[in-house]
Image (cartoon, rainbow, N blue to C red):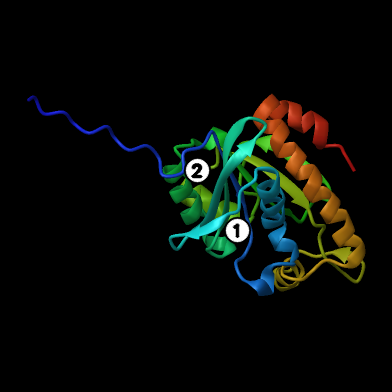
Amino acid sequence: MPFRRAPAAGPRFAADWLIVGLGNPGEEYARTRHNVGFWVINTLAKRAATQPKAVGSLMQIGVGTLQGRRVALVKPKTYMNASGKAVAQALQWTGCDLPHTIVIYDDLDLQPGQLRVRAGGGHGGHNGLKSIAQHAGLEFVRLRIGIGRPSVGGDPSWDPDVVAEWVLSPPSPAERELLDAAVQRAADAVETIITAGVEAAAAAFNRKA
């Protein structure tokens, strides 16, 4: 009987789209501005009827269906500045490429609750994106959620210590209301990206207040 090679195993979490929310692991960071990407993944998980679970040391991952597409939802278990390690592994585990990867993260230079969708671009000084650039590249779709920039004496601040305290603090009740609404719109934007494309999502969501 001739020898037959066993068929190669497919990706561990095969999906049409990889969707990554950036944030920091741990209960102490769960409600901070920097974790808004995690909030969107939690919302998408409910819509996709899945629950990201810890697999290995780098991520929580869950696979479900959105708008008829198989999606892998990921929350890195690394801290923000090492997110690229989780993204690189998730790309291998899902079989997705960067153009079919959506990364969701906070943005200091957008007003709280504003959204911006675009494909490709630089890292803009964001530590999570710097890490992804190092380990995987930057040719992914990005969905930014505004958290506003802190001010000192009424003027916007770029002081690293002031910014760090801001992003790692919970928003005020009024800001939280804006961000909760933005999280739902961001989840809608993700569904639009995977069904109608980036340009359609940008046209629909980039100017919504």
Instruction: Tell me the residue that label 1 is attached to.
Output: 127
Up/down of 108 relative to 161, above or below = above
Q: Are marks 1 and 2 in contact (CB under 8 Å)?
A: no
Up/down of 99 relative to 145, above or below = above
**Residue located 71% across and 73% down the image:** 161
Instruction: Tell me the residue that label 2 is attached to.
Output: 137
Q: Residues within 10 Å of mark 1 (few under 14, many from 20)?
A: some
User: Would you identify the image quadrant in which residue 204 lies?
Assistant: top right
Q: Quadrant of the N terminus?
A: top left
**Image-based side of 157 in relation to 19, left or right:** right
Per the image, label 2 sits on a secondary structure element best described as loop
Image position, residue 7 (x, y; %) = 27, 32
- Whether residue 112 appears in this view of the structure is no
**Residue located 64% across and 55% down the image:** 126
Up/down of 89 relative to 6, above or below = below
User: Would you identify the image quadrant in which residue 189 lies?
Assistant: top right
Label 1, label 2: how many angstroms apart (C-alpha)? 14 Å
- Nearer to us in this view, 181 or 84: 181
Image position, residue 116 (x, y; %) = 76, 41
Image position, residue 78 (x, y; %) = 52, 63
Give the amino acid at mark 1. Asn
Give the amino acid at mark 2. Gly
- Nearer to us in this view, 26 or 201: 26
**Image-based side of 120 in relation to 108, left or right:** left
**Image-based side of 14 in relation to 62, left or right:** left
- Nearer to us in this view, 70 or 130: 70
Per the image, label 1 sits on a secondary structure element best described as helix
What is the residue that sits farthest to the front in this orientation? Answer: 1
Up/down of 67 relative to 50, above or below = above
